[in-house]
Image (cartoon, helix red, strand yellow):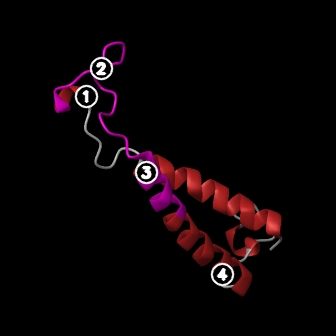
Amino acid sequence: MTITSVIVVFAVLWFLTLFIVLPIGEVSQAEDGRVVPGTPEGAPAHPHMKRKLIITTIVASILSTIICGIIISGVITIEMLDVFDPTG
């Protein structure tokens, strides 16, 4: 597994994790009772982006380490996942 592969695995997992973490614990401006003029009522009242980015990076790092470890160890290989192999 090359360094490029590791970076791609991390980047994909980071963005997937970010999209999972973003809506967790969000309170809209309408629910908070204070809508800032010029913004939609459904906009987050307090996004806490720094905390969410840190959580995303930690979770993505752990998942990347596990997945890259499995790939490098040979527990799962590409041949095991090749469902289109005509030789069966």
**Which numbered disc, 2 or 1, marks the residue that appears first in the sequence?**
1
Circle 3 Cα neighbour tier, 10 Å, few/some/many (<14 / 14–19 / ≥20): few
| Dominant SS in magenta | loop
Circle 2 Cα neighbour tier, 10 Å, few/some/many (<14 / 14–19 / ≥20): few
Circle 1 Cα neighbour tier, 10 Å, few/some/many (<14 / 14–19 / ≥20): some
> In the rendering, which numbered label is found on residue 29?
1
Q: Are marks 2 and 1 in contact (CB under 8 Å)?
A: yes
Q: Which residue is mark 2?
A: 36
> Which amino acid, by three-letter code, is at mark 4?
Gly
Image side of residue 75 versus residue 20, left or right: right
Circle 4 Cα neighbour tier, 10 Å, few/some/many (<14 / 14–19 / ≥20): few
> Marks 4 and 3, Cα distance to the nearest angstrom?
23 Å
Q: Which residue is mark 3?
A: 20
> Marks 4 and 1, Cα distance to the nearest angstrom?
43 Å
Residue range corresponding to the magenta coloring: 32-57
> Which amino acid, by three-letter code, is at mark 3?
Ile
> Marks 3 and 1, Cα distance to the nearest angstrom?
20 Å
**Which numbered disc, 3 or 1, marks the residue that appears first in the sequence?**
3
Q: Are marks 4 and 1 in contact (CB under 8 Å)?
A: no
> Which amino acid, by three-letter code, is at mark 2?
Val
> Marks 2 and 1, Cα distance to the nearest angstrom?
8 Å
